[in-house]
Amino acid sequence: MLTRRDAALRLDIPLEMATRHGLPSRLSEAEIRAIEQDPPAWLVQSRANRTGRKPVWVHLECVVCGFAEDARPKKWWPEWTYLSCDYHAPDQVPDPEAGLARHEVDGIGSRFIALVDQRP
């Protein structure tokens, strides 16, 4: 059984849309396959309206321990070089390349810090 959130991930739609269009809180693999094979009109329309500029979901993964989650991206998130869980020490993350300066951005996903390497 899949949760509504897992179904939204598979269908590449926001969780709010899954709720609004009546996807149940739990779905079987067969139910998801049926939706994927014969999408309802609202899903077809949603996919047709996509501009491709902003992904619906992004996969976040810690470079140190491999903890991963899928989250809805936020407009303020920077382009990062690495992601790290907020409890890892800075020396556990690979150093920036020569000539690059690093700054950190807190609050990515549920517990990540974005490490952004840029030319000074």
Image (cartoon, grey):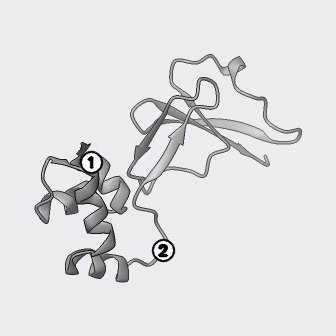
Residue ID at (47%, 52%): 58
Residue 54, percent across and down? Answer: 46, 66
Q: Earlier in the sequence, mark 1 or mark 2?
A: 1
**Disc 1 secondary structure class:** helix
Residue 28, percent across and down? Answer: 23, 49
Q: Which residue is identified by label 2? A: 52
Q: Amino acid at mark 2?
A: Gly
Q: Is residue 77 above or below residue 97?
A: below
Local packing at callout 1 (Cα closer than 10 Å; few below 14, some 14-19, many 20+) is some
Q: Is residue 36 above or below residue 92?
A: below
Residue 4 lies left or right of residue 102; in this view the side is left
Residue 19 vs residue 30, the one in the foreground: 30
Residue ID at (28%, 82%): 45
Residue ID at (49%, 50%): 77
Q: Quadrant of the N terminus?
A: top left
**Residue contact between numbered discs 1 and 2, judged by CB atoms under 8 Å:** no
Q: Amino acid at mark 1?
A: Arg
**Disc 2 secondary structure class:** loop
Label ID, residue 41:
none
Q: Is residue 85 above or below residue 117?
A: above
Residue 96 lies left or right of residue 82; in this view the side is right
Q: Quadrant of residue 23?
A: bottom left
Q: Which residue is identified by label 1? A: 5
Q: Is residue 53 above or below residue 22?
A: below
Residue 96, percent across and down? Answer: 79, 35
Residue 61 vs residue 35, the one in the foreground: 35
Residue 83 vs residue 67, the one in the foreground: 67
Residue 90 lies left or right of residue 96; in this view the side is left
Residue 102, percent across and down? Answer: 71, 37
